[in-house]
Amino acid sequence: MHVRVRCTGLIIENDSVLLVEYDDNGIHYNLPGGGLEQGETVKEGVAREVLEETTAEVTVGPLALVYEMAPHNQSGEYREEAPHGIHLIFECKLKEGSTPQLPIEPDLHQTAVKWVPLHDLDSILLFPNIKNEIKAYAENKKNIELVEDHQLERQVK
């Protein structure tokens, strides 16, 4: 079984979250992110995906949330043929002077990049529906430690 790893950025500033807007059978939103590419770390993937979808350069911080969508055990909002996916959602900070905007060549159906106030999240369609988790994270900032092998002490010399 193949599990797709999606690298995602969670950017919260001034009580608003940065979202990518799509118009595909109606308006819906996603956090900026996408599939991990061969030869890159998950943090490199997050920075690349945020740049591709929002033109913004970010510093990738700690792991904020992990979301899994298993086709056989899901909310019912996805097709059973949908790929099994793990979203690694990292807190990110915009680099100084970096302003998010719609790329010159946006993804198919991508119509905008928007700051959505946290208190307005319940009024939009967000996939996956992690509105409550985003609001709780913004309030509590409980991170998940990502242990990267290159940071570990070598045991074998």
Image: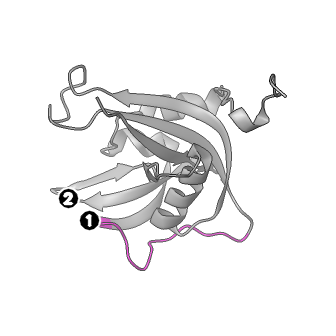
Q: Which mark is residue 155?
A: none
Spot the residue most to the front: 157
Q: Is residue 89 left or right of residue 122?
A: right
Quarter-of-image position of residue 25: bottom left
Residue at position x 19%, y 35% in the image: 78
Left or right: residue 70 compared with residue 103? left
Q: Position of residue 43 (x, y in %)?
A: 61, 47
Quick check: marks 1 and 2 in contact, CB under 8 Å?
Answer: yes
Q: What residue sits right under mark 1 in the picture?
A: 109
Q: Is 72 on the left-hand or right-hand side of 89?
A: left
Which residue range is magenta in the image?
97-110
Q: Nearer the viewer, residue 132 or 102?
A: 102
Q: Which mark is residue 24?
A: 2
Q: Earlier in the sequence, mark 1 or mark 2?
A: 2
The residue under label 1 is which amino acid type? His
Q: Residue at x 45, y 74 (%)?
A: 103
Residue 91 in percent (x, y) is at 62, 42
In the structure shown, which secondary structural element does the residue marked by tag 1 occupy?
A: loop
- Relative vertical location of residue 92 with respect to residue 152 in this rendering, above or below: below
